[in-house]
Image (tube, helix red, strand yellow):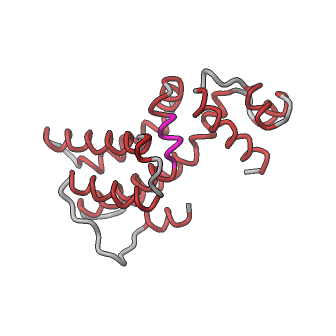
Amino acid sequence: MGAARSRLLAAALELFMRHGVSGTSLQMIADELGVTKAAVYHQFQSKEDIVGAVIAPALEELEAVADAAEARRRRGDRLRVALEGVVDLVVRHRGLFAMIMTDPEVGRLVRSRPPLRGLEARIEAVLTGPDPDAETLVNSAMVSGALLVAGMDPRLTGLDDETLRRHLSATVFRMLRLRPRTAGTTDAAGAANARG
């Protein structure tokens, strides 16, 4: 990705977080960058394209998490890899998750994209396993909701990434009655996250 495109996406995300997608115009993005509206159109044809490009890196990371989790043979290992990957994703993309959760326009655009729906289903299948009972479904819903809300909770904005990651992991592992992996073990999700 070119430097101009990266700057545009960073500026757009900042404006989307401040004003919402519907409250941000292409002219506002251009003004923020000190360029013409035509320069924005040179990179993207619409605001929806910009939203798609803003969320694309997180979707790619979520796909890597799903791949790594599905590659594990044991259910407990699949759960651990998925939870660690999703926690890391939520921590590193706090602003993006806050925007997705609070801006109805972004939520609509994101959820209308087939790749995200497919990824959500894959992660959900890892969390619940085949033929989940009511307790498993409720636990999965609670964990998913807790992670999304924690990523955007203003009370947690002062926490550094490592502290937030550690406490989120401990909480979701407790909720699902899982023991965390022992220190020193690695997996494909950890390797993917280290690259991110």
Residue appearing at x 32%, y 39% in the figure: 145
114 and 65: which is toward the camera: 65
Q: Horizontally, is 105 left or right of 121 in the view?
A: right
86 up-or-down from 9: above or below: below
Residue appearing at x 44%, y 66% in the figure: 190
178 up-or-down from 7: above or below: below
Q: Residue furthest top?
A: 22
Q: Horizontally, is 113 left or right of 122 in the view?
A: right
38 up-or-down from 13: above or below: above
Based on the picture, tell me whether residue 98 belongs to the magenta stretch: yes
115 and 53: which is toward the camera: 53
Q: Horizontally, is 42 left or right of 82 in the view?
A: right
Q: Residue furthest bottom?
A: 184
Q: Horizontally, is 14 left or right of 125 in the view?
A: right
* Image spot of residue 131 (x, y percent): 17, 43
Q: Quadrant of the C terminus?
A: bottom right
How many numbered discs sit on the rendered protein? 0
* Image spot of residue 29 (x, y percent): 74, 31
Q: Which residues are magenta?
A: 93-99
* Image spot of residue 121 (x, y percent): 36, 41
51 up-or-down from 136: above or below: above
* Image spot of residue 19 (x, y percent): 60, 27
Residue appearing at x 44%, y 62% in the figure: 162
72 and 83: which is toward the camera: 83
179 and 150: which is toward the camera: 150
Residue appearing at x 66%, y 25% in the figure: 24
Based on the picture, tell me whether residue 18 belongs to the magenta stretch: no
Q: Main secondary structure of the magenta part?
A: helix
* Corner quadrant of residue 144: top left
